[in-house]
Every structure is written in C-alpha cells, then in structure tokens.
Amino acid sequence: MSLGQGYNEYTPLQLVNYVAAIANGGTRWKPYLVEKVTSPDGKILKEFKPQKIGEVGVKPEALKVAQEGMNMVTSIGTASGIFSGFPIQVAGKTGTGEVFGRDNHALFVAYAPFKNPEVAVATVVDYGGKGGVAAGPVARDLFAAYFKVQNTQQQTGYSPE
C-alpha cells in the first residue's frame, strides 16, 4: 500500500517515529519529550534516556532503497523546489490525506542530514491541500531552526506567496 492511499490513521508522532527508523537503519526508539527535570538549585531530580523498543524487521537493502527514494523527493521530486539551495541535505516524503467533502490534509515527513541523520520531523497542515505545497515548507522552517539556517526563503528561492 502506498503512503496516503487507503484508510490509514497515523498520528504525527507515529509518522516521525517511522521516518526516524528509516533514517537510522531500522531501530525503533521510545519517544520522550523531557530530557531531565531539575530543581531550582540545579539538582537533577529525574533524567530520561533513549530506550530501544525494537527493530523494524526490514532488510537493510530495502531501507537503503527507501532512504534513496526519500532523498530523491527533496532533490528532484515533489519537494525539490522547497529544498533547492537548502544547505542541509534533507530526505523526505510528501503526502496528501484525502478528506471527503473538504480540502485534503497536507503531510510531509523528513529527516536530515541525509547521510548522517540527527533529526526527523512530521508536519501536518489540516485542510492544507498537498503535502509538498503546505506541509513541506513548515518542515523546511523546522530544519532551518534546528540547524540555525538563516534566510531560508532567500536561499531556497521558495516563497509561499
């Protein structure tokens, strides 16, 4: 089944976890939001660490094909205009969640840098139309903030207007 085709119900957290597993070669990690809790005087009260929860059970060759395909989406595919000139090589997948009787939901999942992944994102714009048009630019802005890239619209030549 293709991404976005059929009756799928995934949360953005599930999508980003899925993309992170593709990016890192198949390891699934338990998501967590807080790294540590400290007292006002700086004492660490509780600390959270990454916890491996399993492997995806997909052959490494298949993961490489998925990684290369996601790289092509941002280099020559549906999100290439968004990431043209972006200084960090991003791998991603656009998506369109079909909604009966209304505009579709726009989705985009991605990770970066392509060759040595550090971060994965999933963006959803409710009733935003197509993933490459509405959700992709949101992901680009998140990557720009994470990697401290300035003036991304000027560098990429992309403007939402």
Image (cartoon, rainbow, N blue to C red):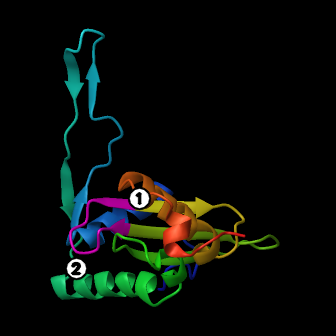
Label 2: element kind: loop
Label 1: element kind: loop
Query: What is the C-alpha distance between the residues marked 1 and 2?
Result: 34 Å
Q: Quadrant of the C terminus?
A: bottom right
* Residue type, numbered disc 1: Val
Marking on residue 149: 1
From the viewer's side, name the closer residue of 76 and 70.
Answer: 76
Residue at the location (55% across, 61% down)?
A: 138
The residue segment tinted magenta is: 111-120
Q: Percent x, y for residue 159? A: 64, 70
From the viewer's side, name the closer residue of 9 and 68.
Answer: 68
Above or below, 39 against 132 in this view is: above
* Residue type, numbered disc 2: Val
From the viewer's side, name the closer residue of 22 and 85.
Answer: 85
Q: Is residue 42 magenta?
A: no
Tag 1–tag 2 contact (CB < 8 Å): no
Residue at the location (28% across, 74% down)?
A: 114
Q: Nearer the viewer, mark 1 or mark 2?
A: 1
Residue at the location (48% across, 85% down)?
A: 2
Q: Percent x, y for residue 123? A: 52, 61
Q: Percent x, y for residue 42? A: 23, 15
> What residue does disc 2 label?
58
The residue at the far right in this view is 101
